Image (cartoon, rainbow, N blue to C red):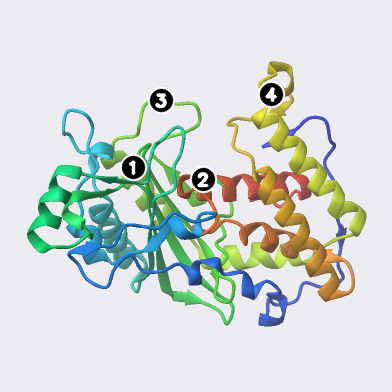
Amino acid sequence: MTITVNPMGVGRKAPAIPEISNEDILLSLADENKRVLPISTNDKDFAPLVPGDGYMAKTRGITLAQLQASSDLTDRDGNMLNGVNAYTLIGKVAGMAREIHADCTITDLFVADNKNRALGNGIAINKQLTEMYQQKHKTENIPFAATTFNRVFCNIALTRYQTQTHVANIVVAYNQRGLQVGVGANCYACRNQTILGANRLVSSYGNGDRTQMPVDEFMKAVRLMLQGYRFVDDMEALKKMQGVTISQDEMTQIVGELTAIRVCCDSSVQKVRQLLSGEGSVYPLNQSQINRFMESLLLTAANKQGDLTLYDVYQSATMLYKVASMDLPNILPQNQAFVHFISERYDLGI
């Protein structure tokens, strides 16, 4: 996504592009996902989630067995929404990953109860079944069998492809609107996920199309994406970002452009919205994220005691795309939107 009120920036080229090392990961303490608590220690029930500030209290880790024990997401007529449940989707993608790339490991599985004005609650509970269970077992816990997890997020590591700092990773996202599968390098230290380009994400919905892609067609698109994925390409792209230096003036210009894009996306004034060029209306960062992004840039610049690289800028953005701090359906599209922003600005070709 680009905005017409600002010209394309041009970064200065560094003399050499070094290998990415652990010392380059200055935001390693920013892995908010590590602080997400498990929803339960058993496969039968879980305690009601206690409301709290932010997304942290509304996001929980879950096991495959617990997800399998939960109820399917259905429409008003009782038909399975999206044509597949989250448990089966994860299994299909993992099986495809093993077939194409040999080794894979499910490393993370999350659900969220955060509310969304368009999609509703993240967790839906059948009150009648829950009351019957609670009376029978003399508990206040909620049974998985009476629970529908409307928003699910899973990480699947392709352990065959890794360096000292990164591992190839597939992300599977499931929500009321549809299905998403993305692939890219994932940083070990800070668990930042890359989605480097349009060909690294398949979605069954979006781009202004109200018609959802059928499951069979979606899975064929996922297969083609995984067959064409090369971990080495991602690492080369990240190294290329290290070869572009960002001055303090350019850093503030980037933040200003991201703010302008956010304003255009959120504006109710048609003329303002029309300033955006390209398809879609997904901003790379919302206003709260822009504040944290700028804070991260300032901190990184202070730690480095000099100019940043484009890699530092991208790290500061991907730090924010975590299940603990944002609505799950937005994680992959915003990640992709940020890559589009910097790729066009610095002619990265991704």
Q: CA distance from mark 4 to mark 3?
A: 20 Å
Q: CA distance from mark 4 to mark 2?
A: 20 Å
User: Is 275 or 130 nearer to us in this picture?
Assistant: 130
Q: Quadrant of residue 194?
A: bottom right
Q: Between label 4 and label 3, give the one nearer the viewer.
A: 4
Say which label, 4 or 2, has the lower sequence index: 4
Q: Nearer the viewer, mark 1 or mark 2?
A: 2
16 or 105: which is nearer to us? 105
Give the residue furthest to the left: 136
Report the residue marked by disc 1.
218
Q: x, y (%) of residue 146?
A: 18, 50
- Would you name the residue on which mark 2 appears? 330
Tell me if label 4 and label 2 are in contact, CB under 8 Å: no
Q: Amino acid at mark 4?
A: Arg
Look at the picture and state if 269 lies above or below 9.
above
Circles 1 and 2 in contact, beta carbons < 8 Å: no
